[in-house]
Image: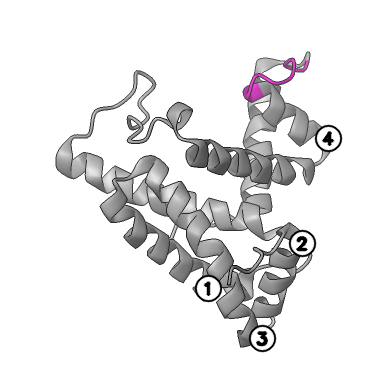
Amino acid sequence: MHTRAPNEAELDALMARLSDGDRTAFDPLFSALHPRAVRVARLRVDPQRAQDVAQTALLKVFSRASEFEAGRPVLPWFYAIVANEVRAVTRGAMVRAQVPLEPDGAPRDIVDTREDPEARATERELELAVERAIETLDPASADAIYAVLGRADRPAIESATFRKRVSRAYARLRVALGVFDGR
């Protein structure tokens, strides 16, 4: 029998319960988050390593459950932790294997998301998680992030002021996403 996956509000409630010490929330939360972590990992690492990356990321999610702030969305926080783990693994793999890089210095994709509907869905979910985090920012910070992403015009302010605003906006976005020190 196939059970329905929890929606975002249910995931938020499960994580809030787990952060309060309710261990009965662990199994349904793990069941819902594990496939998502594997899908994200498969976008950047080979399929054999994706399971390990997902497992390590979920260990970090659950070991930091007490740090989760109830009332905040869990998916941006979760995806930030998964992304940090993927970055750590790909960074290490690039050093060991000299993985080819894109012209902008990013690691070359292992999976072409244009050809993979599951990868496109996962990327869309990641985009929505970041969008939700941006929406929690004050308007000036959100505008700065949108300008850097090319989704809004750059404010008519001095370059140094804009750089400082972007720096502060990224710091606020990291807090909104729950990104700490990458560990």
In this rendering, position of residue 93 left or right of residue 21:
left
In primary-sequence order, the first of circles 3 and 2 is 2
Query: Marks 2 and 3: in contact by CB < 8 Å?
Result: no
Give the label, 2 or 4, closer to the camera: 2
Q: CA distance from mark 1 to mark 3?
A: 12 Å
Q: CA distance from mark 2 to mark 4?
A: 24 Å
Three-letter residue code for mark 4: Pro
Q: Residues within 10 Å of mark 2 (few under 14, many from 20)?
A: some
Identify the mark at residue 9; answer none if there is no mark.
Answer: 2
The N terminus lies in which quarter of the figure? bottom right
Three-letter residue code for mark 1: Phe
Residue carrying label 1: 62
Give the label, 4 or 1, closer to the camera: 1
Q: Which stretch is magenta? A: 148-155
Q: Quadrant of residue 124?
A: top right
The residue lying toward the viewer, choosing from 98 and 118, is 118
Give the label, 3 or 2, closer to the camera: 2
The residue lying toward the viewer, choosing from 64 and 57, is 57
In primary-sequence order, the first of circles 2 and 4 is 2
In primary-sequence order, the first of circles 1 and 2 is 2
Q: Residue at x 71, y 46 (%)?
A: 133
Q: Position of residue 109 (x, y in %)?
A: 36, 32
